[in-house]
Amino acid sequence: MSNGSPPTRRRPTTSSSSDAPSGGAARQRPPVRRSPSAAPPPEPAPLPVSGTKLVCIAGPCAGQEFGLEDGEYVIGRANDNPICIPDSSVSRRHVLIRRVGGGWTVNDLGSGNGTLMNGEPLSEETPLSSGAVLTLGDTELTFNDASNATMLMPMPSAPPARPARTRTAAAPAAPAAEEEGDGEVAIAPRRPPPRPESRVRPGRGRTAVADPEAQKRKKRLLVISASVFVLLAAVLLIMKLQQQRQAEALRQNAMAAQQQREQIAGLFQEAKNLIRDGKWSEAKQRLLELKEAEPEHPQVGDYLARVEKEIPNQVALEAARTALEQNQLGPASTSLAKVSQDTQMFEAVGSLRRGLKDKADKRVGEAQSLLSQKQIDQAKAITDDVLVAFPEHRDAKVVNEQAARAIAERDAPPPPPTPKAVPKPWDQAVDRYRDGDLQGAMAMANACADKAPQCKTLMTQLSDFGTLYKKMEDLDDRGLTRLLDLDRRITNGRSSKLVAGAGKRAANNYYKMASTAKVSGQWGRAMDYAQRALQADPSNTGAANIVSEMRQKAKDVYMSAYAMKDTDPEEALPKFREVMSMTSPDDETHQKAKGWVEKLKR
């Protein structure tokens, strides 16, 4: 470098006048106006205001949004929660979201199914970030917080221009320049006037002599500095590339993890949807895929256990439904019994049980119709099937017993032929008597009287009957009764032609006495006379009607006595005895009344 005169320095000034040297003329430059771009920047536009909210993306409330302000929000199934989710898989008080400082946190409240944030279970209070996904059972919520998102900020305005330094001599000229420029400030500096040639600083006018060694050292330093700079630049470039590659790898890993989480969440949601639709086998396949993708998923184990339990239940229900459609009530009932008590398909179980009951009643009606048509085998098969499903079905048991008796009678072997008994001598005499030949019967009985005592007894009875028979038209009730009694003893209870007229006369007399006793309230006597009338003449309709009425009356008297047996046993005892007199010993009401008479007499 030469040591010549120093370069002329330019001093900026805001004045429009120039500094003239002593004895020189003043030179002026026109003022420089500011450009319009130098105007003050506009006020920054106000930032958009955005709120914080939860958006439901899955579950019963899908599509709903819940705004969040300052405070705490309990989310759960209970109606008194600030945010109510009507989902059976959500606990009554499931999770708490509250504002802490400038952000939000989430904390599980000991829920049954737990809470997941971005697929990870919550074990403590955790800060929330915008876009986080909360999983509460079958419900998923997205947290949107616009206040934490990146927002556009206005650019800062240009700094004001630094005031230019002015020379002392130019200061008085500044006001004139401002007036000339109509108040505008000049920012362009003036070039100072040339200095006098006579002013030369000592030592700067001489040319310096260059040192070769110094030049070499300087070049060497420059080369070393350049090499170090290039090396540092290369190292920085390599580090920058490595950082970019690491950032790209982290971004790819994050994207892959996010995709995997989304895939796992999709598989889990699909499995839950299949479970809701009752497609348990397909749901099992999705859950197995989910378990293979994420073995540590907190809810897959419980869902798989439930699916493994419900698949056999579904198979049993399908078998019961098919058997019911084919009118196979026994297999349908057996299949229904295989369904576990804690099944989630309880509605289908209840529907099938009601259908089974209705089908059983219908099939019993069909069996009764078949039994009346003498199709006893089909009736028996239907009722057997119904009794497998409902062993205590009353109508089915009755029809089944009737069909079983009919089948037994039909399939029973014929009885062996009864050997012909050797005719007895007095039997021939009885047959002759029944045919109306009294004299012939007496002759045959007399012929065998010496051989058998029965013939002798028969001969005596025939003689007594003949005596009464001759004066039958003049007999009173007692005589007619004795005549009919002899006839029954001779024939062993069988009627004969000889007493047909006497029987009708006696039956009419007994019927009149039975009617009189019934009118007077003597139920026992009325029943006795009516039965005698039927013995004398089984075709007597009036006597038969009285017997029927007396049997019904006997039941009424029995119920009356039964009602007062505990409160007034002394009054109930004669009523029970009256029931016994109104009924035959083999009658059911007679037996009951007899039992109460014995108890009340103790």
Image (spheres, rainbow, N blue to C red):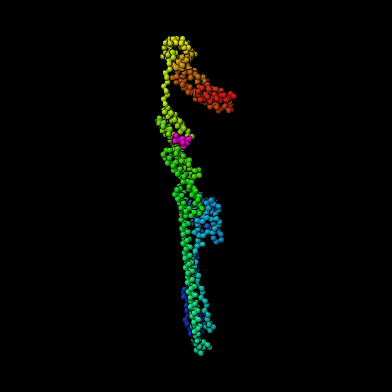
Q: Which sits in the foreground, 545 or 503?
A: 503
Give the magenta range.
384-391
Give the percent coordinates (x, y) of residue 100.
56, 59
In this rendering, is residue 583 above or below 41?
above
Q: Is residue 327 left or right of residue 196?
A: left
Q: Residue at x 44, y 39 (%)?
A: 331
Residue 483, position in %: x, y? 47, 13
- Residue nearest the viewer, comparing 505 with 173: 505
Residue at 51% in and 22% down: 585
* Residue 59 inside the magenta-drawn segment: no
The residue that appears at 55% across and 52% down in the rendered structure is 110
Residue 387 painted magenta: yes
The single residue placed furthest to the bottom in the displayed view is 198
Position of residue 569 measured from the top left corner of the image (x, y, whole percent): 58, 25
Judged from this view, the residue extending furthest toward the right is: 602
Q: In this view, does 478 lie above or below 226?
A: above
User: Does any portion of residue 440 appear in the rendered image?
Assistant: yes
Side (left or right) of 114 relative to 447: right
Quadrant where the C terminus is found in the figure: top right
Q: Nearer the viewer, residue 79 or 401?
A: 401
Our reading of the magenta stretch's main secondary structure is helix
